[in-house]
Image (cartoon, rainbow, N blue to C red):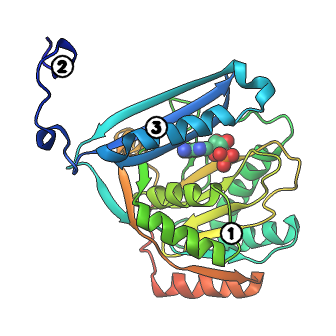
Amino acid sequence: MTEFDNGTDQGLPSPDPAEEENPKTLYNIRMRASVNGKHCSGGEEILAEKDLEDGVARLFKRGFESPSPHFRKDVSISIRVEGVAPEKLRRSALLPVRQLDSDDDQTTRSFIRSFLHLSLRQISVDHEKATQNILDCIDSFLRPEAAAMWGAIILSPSGEKIPLPDDGVRTTHIGIESQTRNDLLTSARSNGISGRRFPEALMLASKVLAQRQVHLELCISDDPTYTTGYIAGKNIGYIRLPHIKRSGMTGGGRIYLLNKSPDEEELAALITELKESPFLFEKTAPISPPQKLTDLLLTCKQELECHPIPSSPE
Ligand code: AMP
């Protein structure tokens, strides 16, 4: 018998159930599914031991059912379960949510430009140039020939791409308490928001924006049928942006814009934190109704003026 084996398979008496399960121990389950090597679904949860089997079954079902039945025989699913070290777990709150009322991609683009102008004033020496660099980056995501990325790109405060060791940084190790999830879903529903994407995107953005070095995140899905993206910013929260791209566009991507150009060590520490440090959300924040472009910009301006960030040299 190895030191990891509890002996039950050898006919030895089962351990005392009270010792067997530690209700405080949490586990991170991560699922990735692909069809013929192409990623088609992913998901993760952080759960107590008693909920693990259900969680594994839920994520398996999600991965297995993501390709159409015709391609199911080609699906490959990997599920990984890891214990979460209690001293590493950060219990956190989700970002508050605002929404742009937009009927077309021109309005949304115009909001993004004006918002970047406002927000970048807080960190960048040349906010005009930085805004343009970020808009150029968005355009590069949306080019028909753009290759899909695995993770997010990281930009310096001036909007220059910072070289990364891998194909983007993938933020993982996030979970949500079940009551918090229910509260979030109820509030989302009453604001006309449905589907799995929004809670997951909000959790990701809430972990990313909790990092001291990240000033804002922008996301455009690479799903051609999903045209709602977001910007999340320090002191602003998460802004849902309908029509961030036109329907049918296959490109997408994520940007993490930093408030200071990092040295090698700072960059490595940020990447490790995003990839490895476990976040459990146990508090949700309000979702505000959609606002017209000028009203939402005014709200953002007021928020930023209330919470100025001391400008940091690049
Ligand atoms: P999605 O919203 O899943 O369509 O993802 C849009 C883009 O965001 C992808 O092309 C990736 O570049 C990036 N991305 C997706 N998931 C993550 C993640 N967990 N962490 C960082 N970037 C991601």
Dot 1 or dot 3: first in sequence order is 3
Left or right: 128, with 20 as reference point: right
Of residue 5 and residue 290, the one placed in the foreground of this image is 5
Point out residue 103 in the picture as x, y percentages from the top left corner. 87, 72
Point out residue 272 in the picture as x, y percentages from the top left corner. 38, 40
Residue at 53% in and 84% down:
303
**Residue 84 is drawn in which quadrant?**
top left
Point out residue 121 in the picture as x, y percentages from the top left corner. 58, 73
Q: Are marks 2 and 1 in contact (CB under 8 Å)?
A: no
Of residue 129 and residue 116, the one placed in the foreground of this image is 116
Left or right: 295, with 76 as reference point: right
**Residue 251 is drawn in which quadrant?**
top right
- Give the spatial CA distance, label 2 vs label 1: 47 Å
What is the three-letter code of the residue carrying label 1? Ile
What is the three-letter code of the residue carrying label 3? Val
Dot 2 or dot 1: first in sequence order is 2
Of residue 162 and residue 56, the one placed in the foreground of this image is 56
Residue marked by disc 2: 5
Mark 2 neighbour density, 10 Å: few (under 14) some (14–19) many (20 or more):
few
In the picture, the disc for residue 193 is 1
Residue marked by disc 3: 56
Q: Note whether 254 is above or below 65 in the view shown.
A: below
**Residue 294 is drawn in which quadrant?**
bottom right
What is the three-letter code of the residue carrying label 2? Asp
- Give the spatial CA distance, label 2 vs label 3: 22 Å
